[in-house]
């Protein structure tokens, strides 16, 4: 005789398949006692994790031979039991998305919602799973690790922090699940955006004008984009500038002061404001006026200095955040401009 137990699975919308089966072979003869003393049984246990949401049932079959005559009992099937994985985690704040800001704790908005370097996640519904769950974070992609998620047992919410942007637009290199003792929830797939590059804003031109009794000022305008152009331009974020190498064409004491600002709510256009005036104090001593003396706005060719400039999004503190552009700030006697622009730039 052969007694077989089989576990079977039907995924939602799919066809039934055998998960695994187990059989026991035995003989009953003329001297086999009847009753419980001669009973035989078989058992098949399976872990639900590889299968997840769907319908489960067992099948029992009995086959044998008696004096050369085959015997096949009608298979016995249990009723299908519907089992669902726990639901996937999700952002605690609707419409929020994780973004990498170079370690700065800032945020920004686009037409599609809010983006932040650290976001709160909420565990999904248990859907009948019992016991203590833990959070599970996995990655796949060229960077290895894209985010960090603290170890937290049975925490309804947890904080995830971006460590690197995704490999490309809508590349879901990060996945988060909850783990109920080896039975995992559905996966939450995360795309990690970042401020990526700058462009000149449509319909807005750079401006040049006089500043003070003798001098000039320039407004050099930009908007910032993320990895996906479909998200729209970034708005409502902090930005800062940092200077490095200075090259002087003529002797001067013109200062270049690093600074940062936060764009007002829903504002997406930022500018580099460059101003110098004969009346300005160029050094620490109030009597040190700017030399050479700047001229009113014009298009002259006398270059005073070039300074390497780096722009970052995510903080108002110079040097903090993620780089979106590198350029040279070129100041002439009567105007200023950006040259050697590199964007995107890390």
Image (spheres, rainbow, N blue to C red):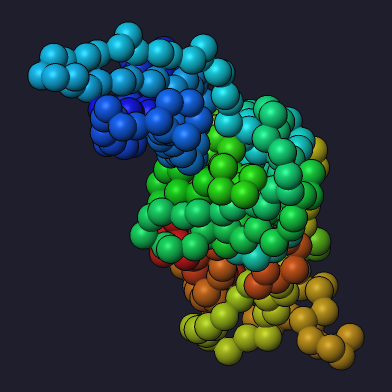
How many circles with numbers are drawn on the protein? 0
Looking at the picture, tell me which residue is in the foreground, 103 or 38: 38
Q: Is residue 274 above or below residue 159?
A: below
Q: Residue furthest top?
A: 74
Residue 10 position, x and y percent, is 41, 19
| Residue in front for this viewpoint, 187 or 261 | 187
Residue 68 falls left or right of residue 112: left
* Quarter occupied by residue 141: bottom left
Is 191 placed left or right of 320 in the picture?
A: left
Q: Is residue 58 visible?
A: yes
The image shows residue 107, relative to residue 27, as above or below, that is below
List x then y, in percent, for residue 336. 57, 62
In this image, 124 relative to 55: left or right? Answer: right
Measured along the vertical axis of the image, is residue 321 above or below residue 286? above
The image shows residue 129 at horizontal and vertical percentages of 67, 35
Identify the image quadrant of residue 240. Answer: bottom right
Residue in view at x 40 percent, y 47 percent: 168
Q: Residue furthest front?
A: 31
Between 200 and 228, the residue placed more toward the observer is 228
Place residue 257 in its image quadrant: bottom right
Residue drawn at x 76%, y 73% is: 278
Which residue is at a point 49% across and 62% down the rendered structure image? Answer: 145
- Location of the N terminus (image quadrant): top left
Left or right for 280, reference 303: right
Direction right: furthest residue: 286
Residue 96 percent location from the top left of the image: 69, 37
* Residue 197 visible, this angle: no
């Amino acid at each position: 005789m052969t007694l077989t137990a089989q576990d079977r699975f039907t995924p939602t919308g799919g066809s039934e398949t055998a998960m695994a089966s187990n059989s026991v072979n035995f003989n009953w003869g003329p001297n086999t006692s009847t009753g419980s003393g001669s009973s035989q049984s078989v058992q098949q246990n399976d872990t639900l994790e590889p299968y997840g949401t769907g319908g489960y049932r067992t099948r029992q079959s009995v086959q044998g031979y008696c004096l050369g005559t085959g015997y096949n009992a009608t298979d016995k099937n249990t009723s299908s039991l519907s089992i669902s994985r726990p639901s996937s985690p999700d952002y605690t704040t609707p419409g929020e998305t994780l973004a990498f800001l170079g370690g700065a704790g800032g945020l920004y908005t686009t037409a599609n919602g809010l983006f932040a370097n650290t976001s709160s996640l909420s565990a999904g519904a248990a859907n009948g799973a019992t016991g203590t769950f833990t959070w599970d974070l996995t990655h796949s992609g060229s960077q290895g690790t894209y985010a960090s998620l603290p170890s937290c047992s049975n925490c309804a919410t947890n904080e995830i922090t971006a460590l690197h942007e995704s490999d490309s637009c809508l590349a879901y290199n990060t996945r988060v699940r909850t783990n109920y003792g080896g039975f995992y929830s559905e996966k939450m797939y995360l795309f990690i955006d970042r401020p990526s590059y700058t462009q000149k804003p449509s319909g807005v031109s750079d401006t040049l004008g006089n500043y003070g009794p003798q001098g000039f000022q320039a407004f050099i305008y930009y908007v910032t984009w993320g990895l996906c152009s479909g998200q729209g331009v970034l708005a409502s974020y902090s930005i800062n500038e940092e200077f490095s190498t200075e090259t002087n064409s003529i002797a001067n004491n013109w200062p270049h002061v690093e600074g940062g600002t936060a764009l007002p709510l829903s504002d997406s256009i930022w500018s580099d404001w460059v101003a110098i005036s004969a009346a300005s104090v160029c050094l620490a001593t109030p009597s040190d006026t700017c030399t050479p003396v700047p001229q009113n706005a014009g298009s002259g060719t006398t270059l005073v200095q070039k300074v390497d400039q780096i722009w970052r999004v995510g903080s108002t503190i110079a040097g903090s955040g993620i780089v979106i552009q590198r350029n040279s700030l070129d100041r002439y006697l009567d105007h200023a401009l950006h040259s050697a622009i590199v964007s995107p730039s890390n």
